[in-house]
Image (cartoon, rainbow, N blue to C red):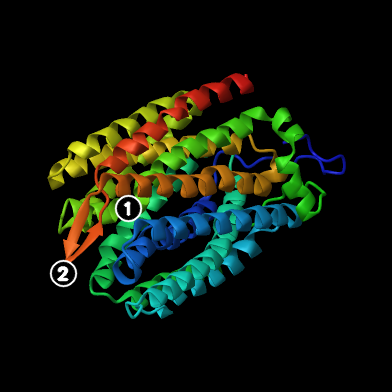
Amino acid sequence: MTAPHPQTRARPPRPTAGLGGRTWTALVIIGLVGQLAWTVENMYLNVFVYDVITPQPEAIALMVASSAVAATVGAIIVGAWSDRSGRRRVFVAAGYVLWGACTAAFGLVGEPDGVASGVVGAMTAIIVLDCVMSFIGSGANDAAFMAWVTDSTTPSNRGRVDGMLAVLPLVAMLLVFGLLDGLTRAGDWGVFFAVVGALTAVAGGASLLLMRDRPVPRSGERVFASIRHGFRPSSVRRNPGLYLTLLTCAVIGTSSQVFLPYVIIYLQRYLRIEAYALVLGVVLIAASLLSILGGRVMDRVGKERFLLPSVGVFAAGLLAMPFAHEPVWVIAAATVMMTGMMASLATVNALVRDRTPAERAGAVQGLRMILGVMVPMILGPTIGAAVISGAGTTFEQLGVVQPVPGPQIFVAAAVVLLAGPAVWAWARRASA
């Protein structure tokens, strides 16, 4: 990113290391409810499609890729818009309310009648609604809320903050598994989507009380001029460390998305673990506690020194998963895998914040969505689907043979992750 615009106001004092109770409350509540909604979109919507619409992995990959593009466009536009206005809170509040309405609307899509045209129609409706929801949710959460987090933190406390934020997806999954999974097992998808949608809308109202916009400098550019700024070669040349750190985020994210969209189906259909929700609950609790401790260690030893060991733990967990078949070993391997994944993502996201110009926090979130979300959500599930189809592993239900994810998805994810250390070494040299 280039230097501040000549008309930019002088940089205001940055927040101190102590964030205060209101800020922490907003971080936890707004962040957690956002992750609840993303858990539905990223994981349970895949299960809904698999169980109700079609079991073909290509359909899930297409839906995930389409929503990733929509989410990225939403983050780019809203991020730059919030930079210009300096008002993150309004975008969060309005976005969460609309996000909740879209989530609840998934329950209105009925089961197709079994003919090809019915399946195509239902799948089209799901993809369109998913894209609308992803555009709104990403603008509210990934752009406005995450830019507000950057505005509200400093390099001295971002390890703790991003460590906590990295845990929230795990906590969200735990809450959904523990409290709402029974609805999906019973086929009460309408109630399931309605509950999560209502919580998301309520969080939007709560954000008006909890969040306070920070006095950050503004770029002085129009929205689309600000968007273009981030894609200029001159911006890359002036801040190569930021862009290479974002590229590192893309590698880690792609590795994660090779297996994450299929992991529940893997536990249910391949390993046939009836108590998969309990297994995941134990994993998420253990990984959450370890990730919170990791955030404190990150602040003490430094983000750059913390990243590669975290990636190493992630890789070790991925390579252990194919050998884990009994619940106790699945818990052990998955805990290592999820702890490493969340620690890696927390570290690289904190590094992105450190290298973000203060007047462009929203615009950088748009760039992060491209490299940290869109690219991984297009490449990762596509790689995963290809691996699943190539392996030829199947599951038979009521006389119908269906493709099912096998342990190969974890090996493929580990192979993708190999690029991470090389990109990070390049980023460190560029920032030196």
- Labelled disc at residue 177: none
- For disc 1, the marked residue is 262
Q: Kindly identify the residue that appears in the image at 24 percent across and 60 percent down.
A: 402
Q: Position of residue 6 (x, y in %)?
A: 87, 39
280 to 302, vertically: above or below: below
63 to 301, vertically: above or below: below
**Sequence-earlier tag: 1 or 2:** 1
Label 1 crowding class (10 Å Cα cut-off): few <14, some 14-19, many 20+? many
- Which quarter of the rendered picture does the C terminus lie within? top right
Q: Kindly identify the residue that appears in the image at 40 percent across and 77 percent down.
A: 118
How far is the residue under mark 1 from the one under mark 2? 21 Å
Q: Position of residue 220 (x, y in %)?
A: 82, 49
308 to 204, vertically: above or below: above
Front residue of this view, candidates 55 and 101 = 55
Three-letter code for the amino acid on which mark 2 is drawn:
Leu
Front residue of this view, candidates 336 and 297 = 336
The answer to which quarter of the image holds residue 91 is: bottom right
Three-letter code for the amino acid on which mark 1 is drawn:
Tyr
Q: Comparing marks 1 and 2, which lies closer to the viewer?
A: 2
Q: How many marks?
A: 2
- For disc 2, the marked residue is 398
Q: Kindly identify the residue that appears in the image at 42 percent across and 26 percent down.
A: 308
Visible in this render: residue 278?
Answer: no
Q: Position of residue 28 (x, y in %)?
A: 46, 54
Label 2 crowding class (10 Å Cα cut-off): few <14, some 14-19, many 20+? few
Visible in this render: residue 252?
Answer: yes
Toward the front, the furthest residue is: 116
The answer to which quarter of the image holds residue 154 is: top right
Q: SS of the residue at dot 2?
A: loop
